[in-house]
Amino acid sequence: MDHSQGAKYDSFTFADHMLDAAAMFSLRDRRFHYLNAAAERILGIDRKAMLADATLPYKLVVEEDRPLTDNFLKQTENEGTSSAEFRIRRSDGLERWIAARSFPVGDIGAEPMRALICEDITERKRIEQALRESEARFRQVAENIDEVFWVMAPDGTQVHYVSPAYDKIWGQPAADLYAAPFKWVQSIHAEDQARVLDTLTRQQALRPLEMQFRILRRGGELRHIRHHSAPVREATGQVVQVVCMSEDVTEQKRLERQADESARAQRDALVREVHHRIKNNLQGVTGMLRNYANRHAEVSGVISEAIAQVQAVAIIYGLQSRPGAVRVMLSDLLKEVVSGIGQLMQQGMEFRNDEHNVGCKVVVSENEAVPVALVLNEMVFNAFKHGCSSSEPSIDMKIDIAKERVTLTVANNGSLAERDKRSAKGGGSGLQLIHSLLPRRGAYFELIDNASGVEAKLTLEPPIVTLKC
C-alpha cells in the first residue's frame, strides 16, 4: 500500500519531516502501512520495498541482537508499549545503533495498529563507548600509580574518588574517606595542620596549589607529602570539583638531606684545607719575621708587633682547619692568642673563663672572626707590652646570658702614656688599629685607666657572637 494513500493517513504527513524513522504497522501480520522519508535514510531500504515486504527491516538486525527485537515485538503485542536498543547492518555494510519505541495508535478495521519510532543513536553509543574506555584507562592509570589521585567537592566536604595509593601512603583504607572526607587531614602533623587547612579552605577552589606537609601514620611513622590541587570549572566558570595529586616524597627528602650533608662535608673539607694552607703560609711569614728581628735588634719591637698580628690571623685559620670544626669558639681563640703572644713575649698571663660557671659556649661569627682575633691580639699584646714585667697581666671573660653578650677585660698594672690618656678612644697606633678593626655592629671597646692599672674592655653581642647554652 502506498504510504500516501487514504485520508486516514493524512494525520501522519508531518512525520515525513521528522529526523527519526516513523512507521505504522499491523500487529496481525506485522505489515507496514506507513513509513516516512527518514526510514529510508536510516535503514537504507526503499520505502516501497519495505511496504511490499515487511520482513526486510527485520533482516537488517545484527544476528546477536535479534533476541532483543523478538522480545521487543512480543512486548509490543502483549503490552502495547515497548522499547529496545539494537544494532542493524545496512545493505551498504554500515552498522548502526537503533533505539526503537512502539505504542498503540488505534485499529484500522479489524487490524490493531502500532506506531514505531526509530532513532539512530550510533553517535551516542560511540560517545558512551569512548567514555567507558576513557574511564577504564583513567582507572587503570589512577589505580596503578604511586601517587594518590583525588577528586573532591570544592569545599572538601565530599570525596568523589580517591585512588588505592591512599592505603599505601596514609596507611588507612581509602574507602573510609567516602564516609569521612576530612579524615585524611587528621593525619597531618600538628605543626603543619593549621597551615594546610587554612590554605585548603581559602585557596583550593580559586587557583592551582602546591604545598608540602608531613603526616603521621599509625605507629608514629613520619612521611613527607607533596600535594597538588587544581579547581575544575564548568562553562559558566563555576568550580564544580577539585582534583588533587598527593605524592610521598619522604625518600626524596632523605636523599636531598644526604646530598646536602655530603656537599657540606666536601665544602667543609675544602675550606679546612684552604685554612690549613693559609695558616702554614702565615707561620712561614712569622718565621721570616723572627729571623729578621734577630738580625736587626733596632726594629725587633716593631717586628714583634707584626708577628703578633700575623699570628692572630694564623690562629683563626688554624682553628677553622681542625677536623670537624665548623665554628670558632671565643675561648679557643683567646687561649691561642694568649699562648702565642706569651711565647713571643716570654711571659705568662692569667686567664679566667666564665663559661664553666654559666654552662654556655660563645661562638664567633665566621665573617667577623679575623677582625675579632686582631682586636684581641692588640689588647693582649698591649697588656704585655705596657704592664710591669714583675707581674702577669690577666684576662677575664664574663657572659651575660640575659643580654646574650660577653665582656672581655684585659688588665695590667701599668699606666697609660700621656698621649693615650688624652685620646683613650682613638689615639695611639694600637688603639687606632683596634677602632679600625672593630665591627660596626655588636662590638664595643673601652679603655680604662685607674689606680690599679689599665683595663681594656671589649663587649661583643649578636651578630658578632652567639651563645650556645
Image: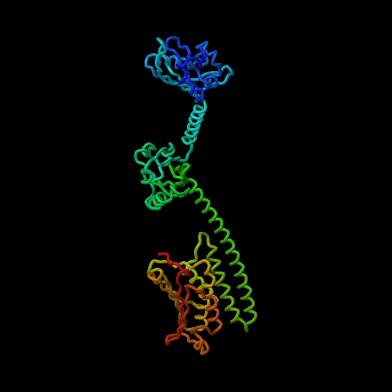
| Residue 288 appears left or right of 246 | right
- State the image coordinates of residue 185 (x, y, percent, origin top left): 38, 46
Q: Residue furthest left?
A: 179
Question: In the rendered view, would you say 48 is above or below 301?
Answer: above
Q: Is residue 75 visible?
A: no
Residue 35 vs residue 75: left or right?
Answer: right
Q: Is residue 311 visible?
A: yes
Question: How far across and down, in percent of the image, does residue 67 sit?
Answer: 45, 15
Q: Position of residue 269 (x, y in %)?
A: 56, 58
Q: Nearer the viewer, residue 225 or 260?
A: 225
Tell me which corner region of the image, top left, top right, bottom left or bottom right, holds residue 277: bottom right
Of residue 386 and residue 10, the one placed in the foreground of this image is: 10
Q: Residue at x 54, y 84 (%)?
A: 428
Residue 3, compared with residue 264, is above or below; it is: above
Rendered-image quadrant of the C terminus: bottom left
Across and down, in percent, residue 397 comes to 43, 73
Q: Residue furthest front?
A: 7
User: Which quarter of the picture shows residue 402?
Assistant: bottom left
- Seen at 49% across and 31% down, the residue is 131
Above or below 386: residue 89: above
